Image (cartoon, helix red, strand yellow):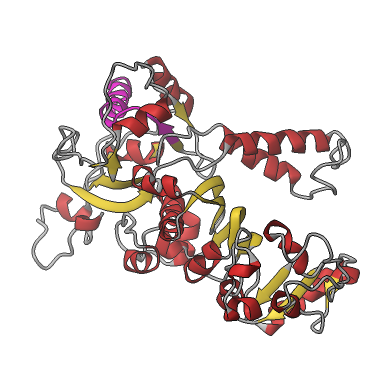
Amino acid sequence: MVVNDLDPGAIDLAGENVLRNGLEEVLVKDDDDDIDDNRNNQGDTSMDDEGIDNSNNNINDPLKRYNLRPRGIKLQVGDATHEMYMSRIPPTLHPSQYNTTQAKYQKTQYDVIDLDPYGSAAPFLDAALQSIVSGGLMCITCTDMAALGGSHPETCYGRYGAFPVQRSGYLQELALRILLYHVQRSGYLQELALRILLYHVSIIAGRYGRTIRPVLSVGMAFYCRVFVEVWDDKAGVNNLSLSHGHLFQSTKCSSFHVTPVATNESVSAKLNGSNNDPNKKVSNVYRNGRGPCDLGEAVCGETGASYKLGGPLWTGPLHDLDVVNDAIMRLEKAEANDGLNPTGGTPVFPLHMSKTLHGLLVSVSEELPDVPLYHNLPAICSTVNSTTIPMKTFKAALVNAGYRVSAYHKDPNAVKTDAPNHVIWDIVRAYCKENPPKPKKVSKRHRMGEEQGSNAPPKHPHSDVA
């Protein structure tokens, strides 16, 4: 394990953490560096610097060259991107294929890479996606929610190549963290941030013939945290456009559409299990996706307003539900055994946050996996100046109408559903008939008979990007 940071103080804290946990025996000292000489001497069968026998299956077996890495925890101060770029050799590359520079300096790829920088992880993603082994796990944390959340969309586009949906005006980051779920017209900003991040990761992976498979993607208090597997899959890269989409958000209400970047009838039929008729010819051509205009809604169907464009974004699953359910089962078994797994697997020691983790995973497991983004129920009701519909009542109406519905782990007011926009507004209209909204308050200026003139500030100074 290599713990790297550019700040010496951070490495000192990491070393103190290692000592406090009684792991000083596995701490690798500075003079116990990675093995370089053995790469130059491919026929060497002697013991390496770490006391590992290379006589049988080390150097000349490309799948077992991980033995070249020193055992234990290595703390170092340095540039993380440089460290990762020095570990780009895939384990399938035989030492006889090394050039001089690779044989002298390059190291094998990592099994797990955890990126947890201060701010955005974007500067480290290219190096990380090249230096991780096929099938390895990447853990990514981004705390730049002011950019991903839409307060600074120009910054988000520069870092991630995607444009989030802006809100009315610009909020400070602290306000963004506290009030993220109180957005009137686009309450899905937390999930959109996750999907923009996954889109960016998948695009970089595709450059090197690799694909990603999200294992767990969560929005926490003020940051995004995603866990993805990275695989060598050139055929999967061809289907990458099918997992990307564009967002069309109404400028006057919470209605939105997510349309794919491209479509392929053959691939879609295989994924949906509907390609059972051998006599039916299915096109295997990748075609451009269609926008709301081709779906019969050139403008918002509820307000007649225009759309604003967001994205691109990842439209595939955010989680691997098999892994999530297995983790839930392990936590439940451990809870009945003083925090330890009775079968000897993980967790191997009690977790102080086990109940919180269990609740998060249960909430994640109940989300609809194939529905990108969600509606915010208070935001929908506030559009028509109505009291908020009880969540159980609203979800029951959707289920009775034949649609699926779930919550979202970050937002207690979220409604994730495959129902179209007009069905959602039909439910709101039906509720308003039984519970008429109160009339909107008239401003003091209008009560006095004064019209809003050119010298008065507009009611919504940023209505064009609201």
| Residue 364 rendering spot, x and y as whole percentages | 57, 38
Left or right: residue 325 versus residue 369 is right
Out of 21 and 136, give the one closest to the viewer: 136
Q: Is residue 427 magenta?
A: yes
Count all numbered tags in the image, as a single digit.
0
Q: Is residue 175 visible?
A: yes
Q: Which residues are magenta?
A: 415-437
Quarter of the rendering occupied by the N terminus? bottom right
Give the quarter of the image for residue 419. Answer: top left
The image quadrant of residue 104 is bottom right
Report whether residue 185 is seen.
no
Image-based side of 458 in relation to 202, left or right: left
Q: Residue 404: give x, y in percent of width and height.
A: 43, 24
Q: Position of residue 386 (x, y in %)?
A: 32, 34
| Residue 33 sits above or below residue 329 on the image | below
User: In x, y percent, where is residue 436?
Assistant: 29, 26
The residue nearer to you, when weighing 297 against 173, is 297
Q: Please, what is the dominant secondary structure of the magenta stretch? A: helix
Q: Is 448 covered by the magenta stretch?
A: no
Q: As drawn, is 310 to the left or to the right of 445?
A: right
Considering depth in this image, is 126 or 67 the residue closer to the camera? Answer: 67
Q: Is residue 333 above or below residue 231?
A: above
Residue in the image at 82% along x and 38% along y: 334
| Residue at 67% across, 75% down | 4
- Residue at screen point 38% across, 17% down: 276
